[in-house]
Amino acid sequence: MARLVIEGQHPLAGEVSVEGSKNSALPIIVAAALASIGTTILDNVPRYTDILDLCQILRELGARVEWTGETQLEIDATNLSGYHAPYELAKKLRGSTYVVGLLLARMGQADVAFPGGCQIGSRPVNFHVRGFEALGAHMWLEHGSIHGEVGSQGLQGTRIYIERASFGTTINLMIAASLAHGTTILENAAMEPETVDLANFLNAMGAVVRGAGTSLIRIEGVTTLHGTRHEIIPDRLEAGTYLLAAGVAGGSVTVTNVIPEHLRTVLLKLEQAGCHIEEDMDWIRISVEGRLRAVDIETLPYPGFPTDLHPQMVSVLSLSEGVSVVQETVFENRFGYTNDLVRLGADIKLDRETAIVRGVDQLTGAPVQAQDIRGGAALVLAGLGALGTTVVDGLEYIDRGYHALEYKLSRLGARIIREG
């Protein structure tokens, strides 16, 4: 099995470019298959393993999906014909849930394996199922799969309140409602930048979506959608990871191909901790000298502090001066990675969904195991700041959300190699 070997305590310096957003690319690739006319070209698509698996699912359903450049994807779903997503592929990734919305809208029925992904807490599909039922679909769970059927009248627009401002549910209902009859209004909708990116893409295909980026989204259903061309927004979570890497290792790093406003809460916390931040339209520079200060964080839906940057932030706080309180309000099992941070010498005490992080003078290298994407990234970052050698196993998780992570970090001056 592949692993990362990291020799720590080498400050970072230089420039790193961010890939396209995984959380935008997954739903947009699925939404491209809503088009029964023409071909879609997507630019700035990252080649994460989740993306590759999703592309294969669409191929199995009858779509033509081809890479026409390093980050360019061409999708022609004119001949989409299947409604049964391959079980072994669909169960591997959380984004396969979006295929349910696609198939109900386009094919009138769906059979998709219960999704997998990182084990960081419950992300119940019942929110999605209740939304589809509100649109008129008959839904049931059986033999490890989500099944759905739509009557002869098709999906019907309605008003839906989204529990917990669920991002995945918001995305899925936007996809399905685009081809529903009448108007769908999503209340308490997720406000992440990725919802805006999807809305912009759907509108370019001929959909009528208004209000994305606010808590109230209005979708006027149309009868057909067509292919278009669209560029995926930058990955704010990858960008945040490199900024936080500098927070652990020290030095000065410029992150390019980024939208600073998407990371506003994170940048404010880094400044509070003692980092020097500069930014322009599409880049952010972080400079770190000496030891940072403890800060408290609470994860919240956008525009709050993102749960997907919480583990990496804890790596920073583990070496900061003072005591930090980290509250996780999104996923109840997000703290699984902390056992391995403690193995590296971090002082972390858990009380339900709160972590008390007492900064230590030094971390020391040790073998550790990634259990999810962001927790794995947190262990890599901790290894950058640790004395000695850290070996990170479980790269199959990290590769689901980062492309060439070790290459990009090594170009910044990190001593990190992939073995196996």
Image (cartoon, rainbow, N blue to C red):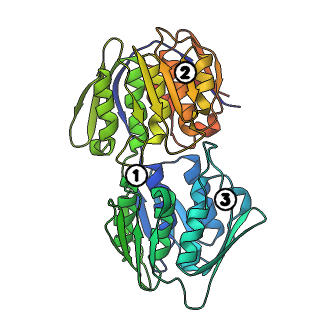
Would you place residue 71 above or below residue 363 in this image? Answer: below
Q: Amino acid at mark 3?
A: Ala
The residue shown at (59%, 16%) is 344
- Can you say whether 106 is above or below 120 in the image? below
Residue 2 locus on image (x, y percent): 66, 30
Helix, strand or loop for disc 1:
loop
Q: Residues within 10 Å of mark 3 (few under 14, many from 20)?
A: many
Name the residue located 45 percent from the left edge and 86 percent from the top edge: 181
Q: How many marks?
A: 3
In the image, residue 150 above or below residue 59: below
Q: Is residue 1 left or right of residue 133?
A: right
Q: Amino acid at mark 1?
A: Asn
How many other residues sit within 10 Å of disc 2, few (<14), some (14-19) or many (≥20)?
many
Label for residue 44? Answer: 1
Front tag of 1 and 2: 2
Mark 3 or mark 1, earlier in chain? 1
Relative horizontal placement of residue 72, taking residue 254 as reference (left or right): right
Residue that label 2 marks: 348
Is 89 on the left-hand or right-hand side of 177? right
Q: Give the percent coordinates (x, y) of residue 118.
A: 62, 44
Which mark's residue is nearer the viewer, 3 or 1?
3
The one of 388 and 295 positioned closer to us in this rendering? 295
Provide the secondary structure element on which disc 2 rests: strand
Query: Cβ–Cβ below 8 Å for labels 3 and 1?
Result: no
Residue, disc 3: 90
Residue sitting at x 45%, y 69%: 174
Would residue 60 be visible to someone looking at this image?
yes
Q: Secondary structure at mark 3?
A: helix
